[in-house]
Image (cartoon, grey):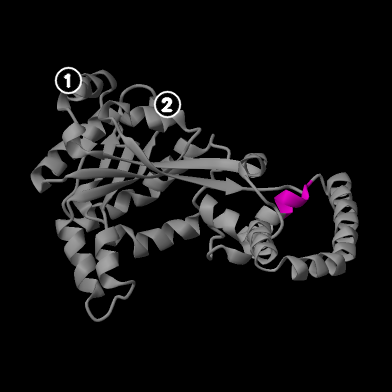
Amino acid sequence: MNINELEIDIQKNKERSPETFNEIVNITLPFYMFYRKMFGGVSRLEEDNYQITHSEIDVLSSLKISGNEEYILSPTRLNERLLFTAGAITKVLKKLEEKEYIESIFPFSNVKPEFFLKAQALIKKRYELTSLTFTKTKDIMPYVDKMFDLFNNSYADLSSFVAITDVQKEYFKKKYISFINPEYIKFVMDKNDNIVAFSIVMPSFSEALQKAKGKLFPFGFYHLLNARKNSKDVVFYLIGVDPEYQNKGVTAIIFDEYFKTFSEKGIVNCIRTPELEENHAIHNLWKNFDPRIHCRRKTFIKNL
């Protein structure tokens, strides 16, 4: 029970039995005064020594205690779980906010090839670039290490980015690359056969996971494999461009290749995984497709 719920409960008791309520007040008032004095002293101690308010501690504690494994709660659920802080928590969250991520979606019908069809041909010619597509997973494997190196270089300037290690590269190659449809991995190569841009898209497995109810057996595998082959929604997981080629329209080559693939497969919706709100370069890639933000995520931190 938080403060809001307690106040409602007290008001109900007051209306139900005024005499009993007065007796309760007389008994509890000294304890309440003691609590206020102690609370004020602790709050000053926290602010003077650690630059953190009691409300901030309340929010972080509630996330720790009531959140899921990743300490995630929606604002509404968080407000319900607060132990001491009453009322709106917007100001508290704003002070603790570290990063904001956005997810968006757009129908494939929004993709107009005229935005990139002519541009990609000119860019290929100007910078001597070629597109590289795949139909077999084994043909992708020789490029995977270089792809992850390019990924690290592409995102190195973002404040919260953590580079992929060699150990992680091996793990991803074994666990994930083989599960991705090879036709959904696109590379752009320079004249020396170096990767200058790449993108990884996957079928959406959300509906399949709902049908499987989180279980692989007995039929969960069937739903996942069926989605891998037949899902009409796709998710853009990774896209990276060599810093030397950023802002030169290289992504037009990638979009042209995906347009061909998605048209053949009858794709309906394109979904973007969480992207940093401050990453304006990546947002500009999608602006011509009129994406709709359908989810926002925030992380919170307090340095002591």
Res. 151 image quadrant: top left
Callout 1: helix, strand or loop? helix
Q: Position of residue 226 (x, y in %)?
A: 17, 64
Decide which of 273, 157 is in the foreground and name it.
273
| Residue labelled with disc 2 | 244
Q: Position of residue 191 (x, y in %)?
A: 28, 30
At horizontal 25% and vertical 73% (from top left) the residue drawn is: 220
- Could you tell me what secondary structure mostly forms the magenta stretch? helix
How would you rate the neighbour count of disc 1 (Cα within 10 Å): few for under 14, some for 14-19, many for 20 or more? few
| Amino acid type of the residue that numbered disc 2 sits on in the rendered structure | Glu
The correct choice, above or below, for 3 with respect to 185 in the image is below
How would you rate the neighbour count of disc 2 (Cα within 10 Å): few for under 14, some for 14-19, many for 20 or more? few
Disc ID at residue 92: none
Q: Position of residue 236 (x, y in %)?
A: 31, 45
| Amino acid type of the residue that numbered disc 1 sits on in the rendered structure | Lys
Decide which of 141, 99 is in the foreground and name it.
99
Decide which of 40, 277 is in the foreground and name it.
40
Please indicate whether residue 92 sits to the left or right of residue 143 in the image.
right
Res. 207 image quadrant: bottom left
Please indicate whether residue 121 sits to the left or right of residue 197 in the image.
left
At horizontal 21% and vertical 52% (from top left) the residue drawn is: 182
Res. 272 image quadrant: top left
Q: Position of residue 171 (x, y in %)?
A: 42, 63
| Residue labelled with disc 1 | 118
- Residue 298 within the segment the image draws in magenta: no
Image quadrant where one finds the N terminus:
bottom right
Give the CA separation, mark 2 to mark 1. 22 Å
Provide the residue span drawn in magenta: 52-57
